[in-house]
Amino acid sequence: MAQERTYIMVKPDGVERGLVGEIIKRFENRGFKLLALKALQPSRDLLEKHYADLSSKPFFPKLVDYMLSGPVVGMVWAGKEVVKTGRVMLGATNPLASAPGTIRGDYAIDVGKNICHGSDAVESAEKEIALWFPEGVLNYERSLDKLIYE
Ligand code: IDP
Ligand code: MG
């Protein structure tokens, strides 16, 4: 069964604050399946492509500088409705509007330092996975899924 996939990324502030494990743990605990994981220093070109839809926003230059400020950790997670559920787990874009229990609601305050990225739709997820993992990602069966899915 081909499962839905999403691109989740720990942003430079999340990496520097040591929150990589915490974010991985939440997706693992929920039952999602890890298909790819890497730490990298993204280039300006990669970030401008990733955030192309926001290029006309006034905060775009600041956003790219923020994302360039250190390494990020990108990952691909798979599972039922993982795109929408991943966004719920992340919380609202503005951390102050994020419910406690979400990643941003538990660890962030300002929108320009909101720790993590999650794809907003299945189509954008597939585009982001191709952009950040041009080498491809895993596709494997996991026996644990028998205990997670009906
Ligand atoms: P999302 O990350 O929740 O999908 P987007 O609207 O796609 O939110 O914006 C991408 C990123 O741009 C946000 O996560 C945040 O880091 C930054 N951003 C969004 N809106 C603002 C803003 O009003 N001021 C500063 N940064 C912003
Ligand atoms: Mg977005």
Image: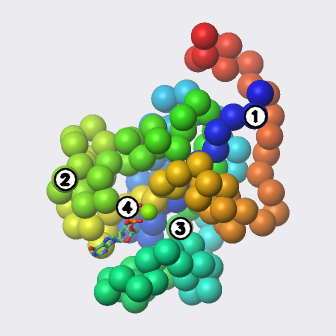
Q: Residue at x 69, y 68 (%)?
A: 131
Q: Position of residue 78 (x, y in %)?
A: 64, 39
Q: Is mark 1 within 8 Å of ligand 2?
A: no
First reached walking from the N terminus: tag 4 or tag 3: 3
Mark earlier in primary sequence (4, 1) = 1
Q: Secondary structure at mark 1?
A: loop
Q: Which comes before the other along the chain, label 1 or label 3?
A: 1
Q: Residue lying at the far left in this picture: please name it.
A: 96
Q: Is the CB atom of the residue marked by disc 4 within 8 angstroms of ligand 1's nearest atom?
A: no
Which residue is denoted by mark 4 in the rendering? 115
Badge 2: how crowded within 10 Å, few (<14), some, or many (20+)?
some
Whether 63 is drawn above or below 11: the answer is below
Give the percent coordinates (x, y) of residue 16: 41, 67
Question: Does the CB distance between marks 4 and 1 fall below 8 Å?
Answer: no
Amino acid type assigned to the residue bearing label 3 in the image = Val
| Numbered disc 3: secondary structure | strand
Question: Which residue does the image show at 44% across and 70% down from the upper left?
Answer: 12
Compared across the picture, whether 51 is left or right of 61 comes to right
Q: CA distance from mark 1 to mark 2?
A: 34 Å
Q: CA distance from mark 1 to mark 3?
A: 27 Å
Residue 97 numbered mark, or none: 2
Mark toward the viewer: 1 or 3: 1
Q: Which residue is mark 1?
A: 2
